[in-house]
Amino acid sequence: MIQTLVAQVTSVKDAAPAESLSLDSVILGEQFYFFTVVLMWLIHVGFMTYETGVARRKNALATAMKNILTIAVVTPSFYYFGWWIYNCNQAGLPIGPNSSDFTSVACQGGLPWSDTFGPNFANNINLVFFLAFLLFSWTTASIMSGALLERVRLSAYLILAVLLGSVVWILDAAWGWSAGGWLTMRFGFHDSIASAVVHGVAGAFTLGVLFNLGPRIGKYTREGLSRTFRPHNIHMTLMGLMLIFTGFYAFYAACLVIVSTTVPGWANIYLSPTTLGSIAMIITMGFAGGFTGAYFTSRGDPFWTVSGGLAGVISVSAGADVYAPTLGYLLAILSGGIVVYVGNWIEGKMRVDDTVGAVAVHGFSGFLGIIWVGIFAAGYPTGLNNVDSSIWGQLIGLATFVPLGFLSGYIASWFLKKLNLLRVPPEVELAGLDAAEYEPDIHVPEFAQVEDLVIEPDGTRVSAEKMQSEAFKDLVRT
């Protein structure tokens, strides 16, 4: 083994300058993706912290464990078939491993038993590039996770996480987030840093699930007004969001390809030229603009202010490689402001109990992001065929991704609901998931018991336990 390594080092020393430069480029790319993967873990630390803070004390540990188990189920499923779906379906359905089209070589490379999917000295980059996509898959599932808090069965959530993280989002990525995707090559679809591909589709999938899952007991009054369940630790929630923001810099950097032997040295996912600095600048302006817009429209509400920052950056991600900083900033302000109204409308008018506002923050903002590109970046050439982006191409992407996300989430959760596997029993929901899944006194003596309060539509605060018990009795009567 040592002799083999020495021989390789010797061969590198004797290589021609061009070959050495090429090898340097490959190793640089390998290191780059490795460190983006490491930093992207902060996103999932953030999701766990964020959701745990939003949940009431009696559901905190179950919420944290749900985020940890997301990694446990999505990782093997994405390895065994998710990566193959991405590599094999770029031209559209149906494409198989033995296809003779332009993706056939990639199809073979996406199989888990292929040479590129193991220790291979001739292929430095495939595994770390795969890991970057795997981290994106965790993110899609985590987007759904927070919306379903406090009433979804763990087993049902994990099934849905595999479907979303290893099938649905990666299929739309094959179609519209690759250099060979049919949306890219035919219509110039442009979603550089995955506004719709990751966030929008995950939000649409989540909405489909929420329709079948239903609201938490007592969320709505008899008159249809919305009550507010207070988070048990709003500081933890805000800190979780800030961790997500930190990890997002690595997330968005991993959406680029290093081509260090040509100017400017970077390309986006469509292999069109860009720079790391332009991406980072738009992300920062997106956060700043989103905070600003949401702060004013929510009248300083802490949760919506920070969530607006997330909405702002998602809304400018699709065009992050082409926007000037001022345009990105203005679009983020507008998007961050709009999403507050959208979130309140979903909760109040649609009566959809989205615990963390994921449908508005991720779904609406994600799809809004590709529309912004169609309006403000029309004509920018995208992909290997240099097809001009256009509002028409972006609308085709919208018409493809919305039903793909929503229908898959709705149908899968409908089957789980019919099998009585989607939602925990009412008595478990009232007692709290922690007491049912762990020990009844799991938070003692680590934490003092604090009574949960719920905010009525008129602003008064009442005991959540008493209110939910009465609401449950009303459900039983009906």
Image: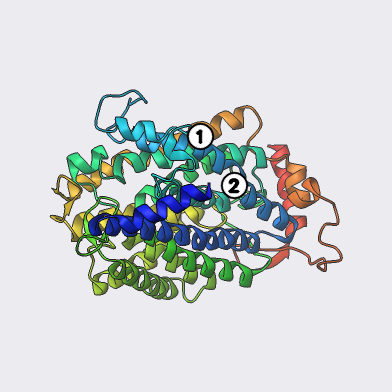
One can see residue 193 in this view: no
Give 324 or 461, whichever is nearer the viewer.
324
Q: Is residue 312 left or right of residue 214?
A: left
Q: Nearer the viewer, mark 2 or mark 1?
A: 1
* Crowd around label 1: few <14 · some 14–19 · many ≥20 (10 Å): some
Task: Relative to 60, say whether 281 is above or below.
Answer: below
Residue 70 is tagged as 2
* Residue bearing mark 1: 80
Give 381 or 134, whichever is nearer the viewer.
134
Task: Relative to 455, say whether 410 is above or below.
Answer: above
Give 229 or 75, whichever is nearer the viewer.
75
> In the image, what residue type sits under mark 1?
Tyr
- Quadrant where the C terminus lies? top right
Residue at image point 72% right, 47% down: 429
* Residue 287, percent from left and from top: 40, 71
Residue at image point 18% right, 42% down: 187
> In the image, what residue type sits under mark 2?
Thr
Asked if the residue under mark 1 is in contact with the one under mark 2, i.e. CB atoms within 8 Å, the reply is no
Residue 357 is tagged as none
Secondary structure under the numbered disc 1 in the rendered image: helix
Secondary structure under the numbered disc 2 in the rendered image: helix
Name which of mark 2 and mark 1 comes first in the sequence: 2
Q: Is residue 261 left or right of residue 462?
A: left
* Residue 176, percent from left and from top: 29, 43
Residue at image point 51% right, 54% down: 347
Separation of marks 2 and 1 at Cα, in angstroms: 16 Å
Task: Residue 376: name its quadrant.
Answer: bottom left
Residue at image point 56% right, 70% down: 238
* Residue 456, percent from left and from top: 64, 62
One can see residue 392 in this view: yes
Give 105 or 282, whichever is nearer the viewer.
105
